[in-house]
Amino acid sequence: MDSALFLNAVVAGLLLAGFYAAVAVGISISFGMLDVVNIAHPGFIILGSYVALMVHQWLGVDPIAISVVLSPLFFVLGMALYRVFYLAFERRGQESLRGLAFFFGILFITEVVLILIYGVDYQLVKTAYSETVWRLGEVGFPLRLLVPCVVSVVMVLGVQLFLNRTFFGRAVLAVSQDQLALRIMGVNPVKVKELAFALSIATAGVAGAFLIVIQPVQPSIGREFIGLAFAICVLGGLGSLYGTLVGAVILGVAESFTATYFGPSWAPAVSFGLLLLTLAFRPAGLFGR
Amino acid sequence: MDRSKRRWLSRAGALAVTVGLGVAVAQAQDIKIGCGMALTGGLAANGKAALISMEIWADDVNKKGGLLGRQVKLICYDDQTNPATIPGIYTKLLEVDKVDLVVSGYGTNLIAPAMPIVMQRGLMFMTLFGLDVNAKFKYDRYFQIMPAGPSPAFDWSRGFFDAAMSLSPKPTTVALVGADAEYPWAALAGAREHAKKLGLKVVYDKTYPPNTVDYSPIVRAIQATNPDLVFLASYPPDTAGMVRAANEVGLKTKMFGGGLVGTQFAAFKTQLGPLLNGVVNYEFWTPEVAGKLPFVSTFLVKYQARAAKEKVDPLGYYLPPYSYAMMEVVGQAVQGTKSLDQKKLAEYIHASEFDTVVGKVRFAKNGEWARGRVMSVQYGGIKSNDLSEFTKPGVNTILWPAEYKTGELKAPFDAFRK
């Protein structure tokens, strides 16, 4: 076996996993921890892409740096969205089907607004490092994938540490298990869910900046990643962010190896085959409880 | 109710009936032409540009009095670049909107699903940039405006392989790669025929899912087979992904390109910029042939003014002239037959030559252009990502066909990366 080809496949898979983890982490929070069926998550990822594009065109600043700085804006947007969702649906116990329709509506509205502002043409941000490849022997590290991967891992681990080590984080984990117990302890689960949902939307904004650095985007491209993002969350175990990271690594490396050695058209079959196999032995996913 | 109120009500009723009848008569007089078009989704950038061209045509025709003395009205719905929406859209156009004629949306993937409905009803079907769709349907009322030639799948890559065989020493191996979709399949089928005919050994022949994010494993797998030529058939997002991956991996091959959709539009020309240097691809019009295809330039002035406002491809070298030409063929056929009869229209189109903004067009028996005009171009000398580099001659060397040739192929591909 050609060692350079093998090592490059591993590295490409890991770099890809970084991006996948950033896309999936918000879904893992909203679906896995909060039971909020935020099907509009891809819409917020694309919104993140276009916000990064807009500010980049205006100030010339790196889109990923922009997304980190502007993540509080997405956080506030997430809070507002959850508040509407709670008042209109969740409070009345209508969050399942009507809530799903609500988030579908949000997804379409986001896309249409972006089309009206930017048109339907593909947009891409060229950064200072877009065409740079670091080489370690025969192994290549394209920075347009390496930078998002590093920032993504820091983001996912940071969010997980925050959830594990803070009172708020433990409250988020508790809200997914027993809201009544949380109330008895004097914590308002709605407020906790609002903040946690806002966190998931903030991660979507950052993932959007990664996307527009990695590839050209148009307003409806986000939908293409939703299937894979769900697969990663389920594989890792819904609600476990470490699981999301591990799931992303497994599917990213599997995709890279399949493309390298067997043919890229098999990649989705291998990824979802791995998912089914895992669920057969661990129905809650690798790190699910 | 007193008498005056009753009188007002009866007058209002009479007025409503009159206005209603008037609208109905006006609607009956319009010639309605329906289509699905990619206005959102992956092909929307082109779809919207195509629709603008069709609207420009409708405006031009209506200003001159319409067709058969009736105004033309376009009814087009967004197909979301989703083939699954097509049967519903065409059924609605025919059953609810009662259109007189239908034309296709943009692209092979969106034309093929309309064929069963169109054939079932015996409609004349003008289509926009479908590659070899009629090969399996063999429908005698199918017409296609892309200048691919009478054997579209084969003719599509003729220029690429013709240029390749001019290399010395001649290439002996080829890698074939493309997206899992209708158009790349057809283009790859044509490339396989060329490889067989030319005695080239196919060392890699695979497709990839269109939503792939990182293409570098694919390019590395191709590199591992060490091919002399790499023929790629891709749609816009994967075009960008493959070109960038080829640059990142440092793909070593004599020739790379062939069937990349995307590099013809301003967005991709400017986004990829110097990364395109060395890539060989197809084009339908470039500033280098402006003198030989002057009619296109005339149309582009009209299109570009409108494109800027609508935020679509500001160059319009690729699809817009052909979209306009498609409608010109339909219009000239209606005028020529003085009829909307589908059979007569199809027979007329088969028998006639059409004078359009893309030149004179005659159709072969299978509905494709009787004589193809797909140019094979090598990009080179692109220094920046500025659009102005692409609006004047200099960055495209036309390799094929001979009548438009402006230079020789430069190889290998990796020499452009140094």
Image (tube, coloured by chain):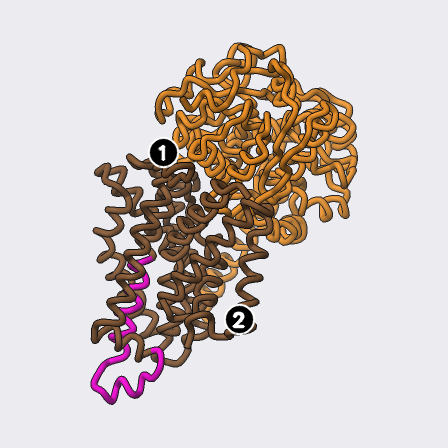
Q: Is B138 situated left or right of A246 in this image?
A: right
Residue type at tag 1: Glu
Q: Is residue B69 above or below residue A200?
A: above
Q: Is residue B32 above or below residue B345?
A: below
Q: Over which residues does the magenta segment extend?
A: A176-203
The chain ID associated with circle 2 is A
* Chain in orange colour: B
Q: Is residue B35 visible?
A: no
Residue type at tag 2: Leu
Residue pointed to by mark 1: A131
Q: State which quadrant residue B166 falls in.
A: top right
Crowd tier of the residue under label 1, counting other residues whose Cα lies within 10 Å: few below 14, some 14–19, many 20 or above: some
For the stretch drawn in magenta, the main secondary structure is helix
Look at chain A in the picture and name its colour: brown
Q: Which dot marks residue B415?
A: none
Residue pointed to by mark 2: A279
Residue furthest to the bottom: A184
Q: Is A272 situated left or right of B369 in this image?
A: left
Q: Is residue A243 above or below residue A136?
A: below
x then y, percent, for residue B44: 49, 41
